[in-house]
Image: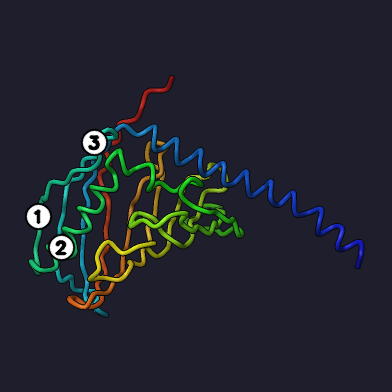
Amino acid sequence: MFAVCIASTNLLPAQQANNSAIIQGIDTSVNARNEGILGYTVTEHYAVFRSQDQEHPAAEMTVKTTYQKDVGKRYDILSESGSELIRKEVLARVLENERVMTQPTNRARAIITSSNYRMNPSGTESLNGRNCIVVSIEPKHDSTYLFKGKIWVDAENYAIVQLEGVAAKSPSMLTGAAEVSRQYAQMDGMPMATHAKAVSKSWLLGETTVKIDYTGYEIKQRSPQ
């Protein structure tokens, strides 16, 4: 028993060192993306579903998103249909929240790094054919831009593959914090969102699910030094 205790004690520093290396890898990957992408355009399709009906959207919107590192995001609506109330109270709020979050003054406090989150690696899983490390994340400060939950990062390059969590703070007193999931794929060497889903509840609209698909990325990257 004494020998087992000694062995367990000796494992702790090694595990802590390994966790520190993982967290440092995540920071390096996220910061490289944040600094390396000067801008991009992408087509985003939003579909809003009510309650248990996940087949018939109550509202839809397709937008052309333009991101510039020194400006943030702006949106051009290409098409929209369905409930005007939902488009105004749900989709317009989602777009505005993203616009504000990506402004340079807010961006640093929204990215998934150890400066904003306490991180705890908790194992490995295979996800979409990629060997991933599962990491629990908990915000270090209250913000509508941060989440409490888990991320899956590529075990080789620490790029984020998937996020699941609950927003740390609701953007509106009328709704509860959204349950969010987001999937990423490597495009031009950068992890970019491909699909996302957010589920929230409000006294006005009940339960709403927003599903987002991202297609047609055109990415402008910083030239290698």
Q: Which amino acid does label 1 sit on?
A: Ser
Residue indicated by mark 3: 71
Could you tell me which secondary element the residue under label 1 belongs to? strand
For residue 25, side relative to residue 44 (left or right): right
Residue at image point 16% right, 54% down: 62
Which dot marks residue 60? 2
Q: In this view, does 23 lie above or below 91?
A: above
The answer to which of marks 1 and 3 sits earlier in the sequence is 3
Q: Do the residues labelled 1 and 3 touch (CB within 8 Å)?
A: no
Quick one: which residue is furthest to the right in this view? Answer: 2
Quadrant showing the N terminus: bottom right
Q: What whole-number distance in Å separates the C-alpha atoms at marks 1 and 3?
A: 24 Å
Q: What whole-number distance in Å separates the C-alpha atoms at marks 3 and 2?
A: 27 Å
Residue indicated by mark 1: 79
Mark 3: give few (<14), some (14-19) or many (20+) Cα within 10 Å: some
The answer to which of marks 3 and 2 sits earlier in the sequence is 2
> At which x and y percent is residue 205?
18, 75
Q: What residue type is labelled 3?
A: Val
> At which x and y percent is residue 78?
10, 50
Mark 2: give few (<14), some (14-19) or many (20+) Cα within 10 Å: many
